[in-house]
Image: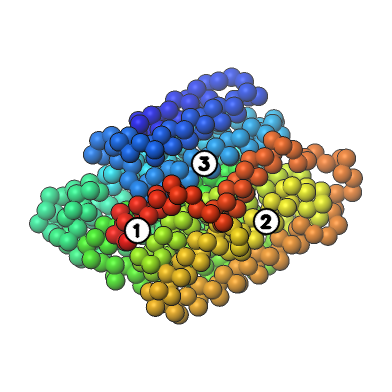
Amino acid sequence: MAFLLIFFPLLMAGAAAIFKSNRWRPLFLPLTALPQLFFTIMVLVKPELAVTNSWLVLDPPGKIVLLLVNTLFLFCSLYAVSYLQYRKERDNRVFCACLIAFAGAVSLVTWSQHLALMWVAIEATTLVTAPLIYFNHNQLSIEAMWKYLLISSVGIALALLGTFFMAYSSMHGGKEATLSYVTLLKNAPHLSKTWLHLSFILLFIGYGTKMGLAPMHTWKPDSYGESPGIIGAILAGGLTSCAFLAFLRVYHICHAAGEFAYMSKTLVFMGLISMATAAIFMVGQRDLKRMLAYSSIEHMGIVTLGLGIGTPALFGTLLHIISNGLTKGVLFLSVGNIHRAFGSKNVDRVRGAIRLLPFSGTLFLIAFLAITGSPPFAPFVSIFAILNGAFEAEKYITAGLFLMFLLLVFIGMGAPILKALQGSSPVPNREKMIFRDTIASCGPIIGLMVLVFILGVYIPVPLSGLLNDAVHFLGGQP
């Protein structure tokens, strides 16, 4: 099943690349996404399919990320068909091929049980997403693409060095030099502490760069701001989740080696720094997409903080990966609709969006409330679980700072969003609008929003079981 999930999207990407019709090529996206999600569900239902060989095993955390990304990919692919119809002037060959290939790269990340193979998969996600950022083919988008490539390349290079140090920690500890995830976990107590610490720092910086943690976040505002809304959703909900999974495996090895105390302070500090950075840069932010980029920085900080708190917050941390990914999908897709209708994403030109685009505007407003931790939505449940974990771990100062930064982010995001949604529209005649809300452009967003609401009031038993299995797998209590 691993080979099917990895190579099926790659074959479909190749087919999309050689397909001649610019009009019909976008259909390859949902035709890939539907089977991909079906294959994912099959693996979750039948555990015996989760093992291919020693290098390809879908472990509990990998199941969570694979389910999230393929669910998000399905809704984004349905949205993309409508979106690309509005972009007929732009050739979509590279767009469709790279977006489909991303699904294959994600599958490889989630299945990888060898740290070197996982590194290759993370690098593949970088290479296939870079052209997507350049889809608009203007000066700002090419600058954003190169910034993304350069900063990510530095981060991934540090991650490679950290990966080598991980192997050396095994050899220096008297064991065989290996990058097998399972073997490293088994030999974790015997790993050389010095080399393990160095490996942890380099891998944290490397994969933290891909996650967009401050101060390694500088690629995010430009990349999210200049790429289409659908690509922002894929980056914020999919790419960062894969990077988090890669670091989570490093965290697991260090935790098994008895180095949680060493990691905890660093993770809590960097998590709070990321939240503080997002809160500061949201103040006075006028670009809606860049504002969502800072929101992504904040939420990567939240999950990093959750890891730093430890076992009491682990369930909430894993749940937050799902809730953040789905909610980011709603935010980016709805702001993409607003951008096309007004021809701008700047609040100086976007006014009265909720009147001209009642569905997109309303969804954007609801998703803003959700992502800032308002009930009854999924992020509220996951954020509350992390906060409760902080109190249970007796980290009261951390909990207080956590709440303060959440409040500052709510205020910082609220001002530009309400300004854009309310007031009189600068578009004088609605009949002259190029873009309007349609079933095709709003249906996928509504579907994602329904999932965010459902997970806010009830976590299905199968999903709860996946989360508990992951907590138990990582060394906590189910």
Res 476 seen here:
yes
- Which one is in front in this view, the residue at disc 1 or the one at disc 2? 1
Disc 2 marks which residue?
366
Q: Quadrant of residue 78?
A: top right
Q: Amino acid at mark 3?
A: Thr
- Counting residues from the N terminus, which is met first, the one under dot 1 or under dot 2? 2
**Helix, strand, or loop for circle 2?**
helix
**On the picture, is 125 further left or further right than 261?**
right
Between 26 and 147, the one lying in front of the other is: 26
Residue located at (62% from left, 49% from top): 449
Disc 3 marks which residue?
71
The correct choice, above or below, for 401 with respect to 163 in the image is: below
List the single residue furthest toward the right. Answer: 429
**On the picture, is 190 further left or further right than 9?**
left
Residue 19 picture location, percent across and down: 55, 20
Q: Amino acid at mark 1?
A: Pro
Label 1: few (<14), some or many (≥20) within 10 Å?
some
Whole-Å distance between the Cαs marked 3 and 2? Answer: 20 Å
Residue 55 picture location, percent across and down: 26, 39
Residue 347 picture location, percent across and down: 74, 58
Disc 1 marks which residue?
478
